Image (spheres, grey):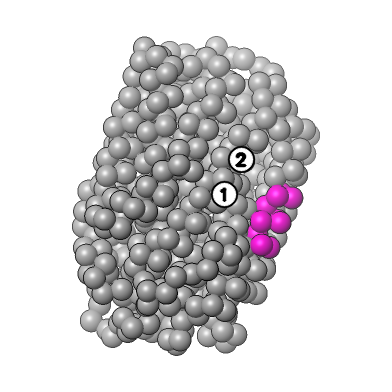
Amino acid sequence: MTGLDRRPAAAATDATLPRGPLAGFAAGSLGMGVWVTVPGLLLLYFLTDVLAVDPWLAGIALLLPKVADVLLHPWVGHRADVEQTRRGDRRRLLLVGCALPLAFAALFAVPGGLTGAPAAAWVAVFFVVGNLLFAAYQVPYLATPADLRIGYDERTRLMAFRMVVLTLGILASGLLAPLLTGGDTATRSGYQRMGLVLAVGMLVAMFVGVAGISRLRGSAADSTPAGHGGWRALRTALRDRQFRWLVAAYLAMSTTTHLVLAGVPYYAEYELRATGLTTVLVAAFVAPALLVTPAWLMVARRVGKQRALLGAQGAFALGSLVLAVGRPAGLPVLIGAVAVLGVAFAGMQLLPFSMLPDVIRAAPATTGAGTYTGVWTATEATGAALGPYAYALCLTVGGFVASTAGESPVQPDAALAAVRYGFGLLPAVAMLAAVLLQRRYTLDATARTTS
């Protein structure tokens, strides 16, 4: 932490937020859940097995747009703080972000004549546009908890509402998207249909989220002056030791979870030899969060957010090792292991996002919340790119053969091994790194007693 003056602790209170505005705020995550799930789940497979893009090129097509986010998201964070300072809210930026569904639909509407490198270029361009619009919505959205006069536990409660609705978005889109594409007989037109249908749902949910944020700010807006953005504020945020360790740990977590999502279709088809199991695995991964999020909330209140998060990370690593065994473990065991990952995933979505406003509240008063959330969402976007890219590299090393829709090339044994170990062993190693990084974060005890 820096030696600058902190926001006064009195600005955070024990006020309880009303359920109506909470639900409205959380609804915004329904639309965002589609964006964070469907491209991560299907885009790599869409490129390699429908558009005949080589795995190495497909990985680059997904990585480069996310690299651009490293610069774009902090800039969006700066704009969010400027809006907060000038207008007293970030509503205008949120409304710009509501154009995200258009980019989502275009992402999967690749013209029929494009395959290989041209198809990869189409996807990459609209991925950049979509990521920028996603940042315009997500950055001010995630700044909301730090803008409100609420305390340590109420921030967790607020994010628990978000997590439940986000899980619904992830689960619904994760289950519907493969079905809308055509399932075992997915086609270009099926992917286009899927993009249009889910885009409509995204649009409605995101507008409801904007209204919910306005109502929350009306009931518990912070009376402290807004911080300022810009490069000076960005440097201050990056010098914040607690923020750096939290962000580093979250990068490892985000990379791991997106790697697993990208690997699901491959693991179902090539390891379990049943493409239809993609939906089952997605459900096993996401559905537990609907049941266990309240449990994570109680655990965090009892032992603190950081200790609860370390437990979630450890469980994720152990479940991943079971998946590395593959078919010999038996289908029920493998589905159970994915469910363990899902329980851990729920904690890794709730807890870091509720720790972020703790860091912001302890930050220099001259640094706006948008600056912090801009860096945070850039980190999330980077993890969303590194995960599929890491899996694509595994496939490339194994000699995986790309194809178009309807083709069924024979994969070499090394490629099949890459499918299995990339889905199980690699996530375990990455999550171990997250545990080691998270142990360096030391703010939790102080935030728990002073907020």
**Residue 380 image offset from top left, x and y in percent:** 45, 54
Q: Secondary structure at mark 2?
A: helix
Q: Secondary structure at mark 1?
A: helix
**Residue 225 image offset from top left, x and y in percent:** 45, 87
Q: Residue at x 41, y 43 (%)?
A: 292
Q: Quadrant of the C terminus?
A: bottom left
Q: Which residue is mark 1?
A: 33
Choose the circle earlier in sequence order: 1 or 2. 1
In the foreground, 342 or 134: 342
Residue 172, disc: 2
Q: Residue at x 34, y 53 (%)?
A: 298
Q: Quadrant of residue 358?
A: bottom left
Does 15 lie within the magenta span?
no
Q: Residue at x 23, y 81 (%)?
A: 3
Does 203 lie within the magenta span?
yes
Which portion, as a residue range, is magenta? 199-208
Classed neighbour count for the residue bearing mark 1: other residues with Cα under 10 Å, few (<14), some (14–19), many (≥20):
many
Q: Report the amino acid beneath label 2.
A: Ala
Q: Main secondary structure of the magenta part?
A: helix
Image position of 321 with respect to 368: above or below: above
